[in-house]
Amino acid sequence: MQVGNGLDKYIAELNKLAINTSEVLGRSIYVGADIVADEVRKNIEKIPVSNSPKRGTQSDPIDTITSAQKTGLLQGFGISGLATTDGITNVKLGFDGYNSQVASTSVKRKWTEKRQANIMIARAVEGGTSFRRKHPFVAPAVRATKKKVEAAMAEQLDKEIEKAIK
């Protein structure tokens, strides 16, 4: 999600007040990121779970994940540190680490024999694969929270400006 046009006036006000703009923007950005992250977590909770050993095929794709995969998504999901690149300050929401799902011993690739990367599972669930139906959980969270995030960030910026004026 990119928020910028509506926040330009706030940035100009902060600059006039000689406030540490990066610090103030960072606090506001995290307020928005928390809202989106909470919605993503709610959507992860809604992903259907099945611990059956059924493997999907192109003609019969699976539409569930295992409880270990869901736990991995929830535990591996987070917000990155604040970063400023080319004048754009942001945080990223994403997945880190591995879940405890033990893959089939018939799988020949060594990297999947013990654990699965949470980012791989997230991508496969979000967009689907040739053997898995898609079950979007990130994109709907971003769409559902956009106006709320913009309002919360603007409110936080207003609070910061008021605090600086006093």
Image: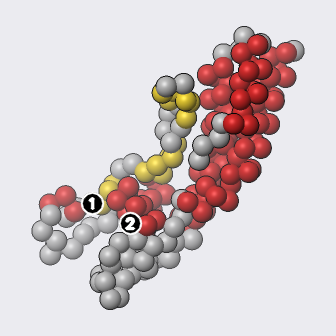
Q: Amino acid at mark 2?
A: Ala
How far from the left and from the top, in percent, is residue 86? Answer: 49, 25
Q: Residues within 10 Å of mark 1 (few under 14, many from 20)?
A: some
From the viewer's perspective, tell me whether residue 68 is left or right of residue 163: left
Query: Which of the pair 105/91 is nearer the observer?
Result: 91
Secondary structure, mark 1, is loop
- In the rendered image, the quadrant that contains the C terminus is top right
Query: Which of the pair 94/65 is nearer the observer?
Result: 94
Query: Which of the pair 7/160 is nearer the observer?
Result: 7
* Residue ID at (32%, 56%): 117
* Residue ID at (62%, 29%): 26
Label drawn at residue 87:
none
Residue 14 image-quadrant placement: top right
Residue 15 image-quadrant placement: top right
Judge whether 12 appears above or below 99 on screen. Answer: above
Mark 2 vs 1, N-terminal side: 1
Would you name the residue on which mark 1 appears?
115
How far from the left and from the top, in percent, is residue 40? Answer: 57, 58
How far from the left and from the top, in percent, is residue 137? Answer: 54, 64
From the viewer's perspective, tell me whether residue 164 is left or right of residue 93: right
Judge whether 30 appears above or below 103 on screen. Answer: above
Would you name the residue on which mark 2 appears?
124
* Residue ID at (59%, 47%): 1
Q: Amino acid at mark 1?
A: Arg
* Residue ID at (60%, 43%): 2
How far from the left and from the top, in percent, is residue 157? Answer: 76, 30
Secondary structure, mark 2, is helix
Q: Residues within 10 Å of mark 2 (few under 14, many from 20)?
A: some
